[in-house]
Each structure stands twice: as C-alpha cells, then as structure tokens.
Amino acid sequence: MQKWIEADKLALLDWHPMFTSRCPNCEVTIADQADYVARICGAWDFGIIPTPETFLLFSTWREVFDGFPLLHSPAYAAFRSGFG
C-alpha cells in the first residue's frame, strides 16, 4: 500500500479527475474556445446576457479574441473592450 504525505494528498485535489471534473484525455483546443465565444456572442447579440462567470472566463482568453475576431458582433466588441 502506498503511503501519502499530507502535501501529496492536497496536490491530488488539483489534478485528479475525480476532484476537478476534468477529463485527462479531453483537452480543450483554442478552436473549441473560439466556437464557444462565437456561441456566447451570438446569444448576447440576440438578448441573452452571459453570466458573470462567463465574463470572468473570457477575461483570460485574450488569445482567442485576438485570433478569431467576430467583427460583426456587438457582443464581441463589448468583450474586447474588457482587454483595454
């Protein structure tokens, strides 16, 4: 039986799929992120306001916004304004 020290047990919480709900074989690509941005922007363009969590998430996705512009979308412009 393997002995775990306390630090190892705590580190397990950060990466193990049972605790993170992340699939280790299911990496999200930048294209997946861009698709999600397009869907959220499209919904907002038609009046469905994103959640505060979405705003927080998108604040860390500058690379996606730079690489996949949605120039026709007012929602995209609003999200972009958050990058300064």
Image (cartoon, rainbow, N blue to C red):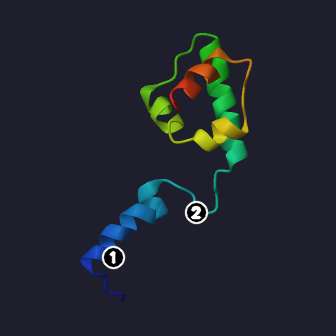
Q: Amino acid at mark 2?
A: Pro
Q: Is residue 2 left or right of residue 41?
A: left
Q: Amino acid at mark 1?
A: Asp
* Depth order, front residue of 19/55: 55
Q: Determine which residue is flagged by label 1.
A: 8
- Residue at horizontal 28%, vertical 75%? 7
Q: Please tell me whether residue 23 is drawn above or below residue 68 in the rendered image.
A: below
Q: Which residue sits furthest top?
A: 47
Q: Please tell me whether residue 16 is drawn above or below residue 42 in the rendered image.
A: below
> Residue 44, percent across and down?
60, 17
**Which quadrant of the structure image shows residue 65?**
top right
Q: Counting other residues with Cα less than 10 Å from the Cα at mark 2, is it few (<14), some (14-19), or many (20 or more)?
A: few
> Residue 43, percent across and down?
63, 18
> Residue 78, percent across and down?
56, 20
Q: Is residue 21 left or right of residue 32?
A: left
**Which quadrant of the structure image shows residue 9?**
bottom left
Q: Which mark is residue 75?
A: none
Query: What SS does tag 2 mark?
Result: loop
- Residue at horizontal 64%, vertical 11%? 46
* Depth order, front residue of 23/42: 42
Q: Disc 2 or 1, which lies upstream in sequence?
A: 1
* Depth order, front residue of 59/2: 59
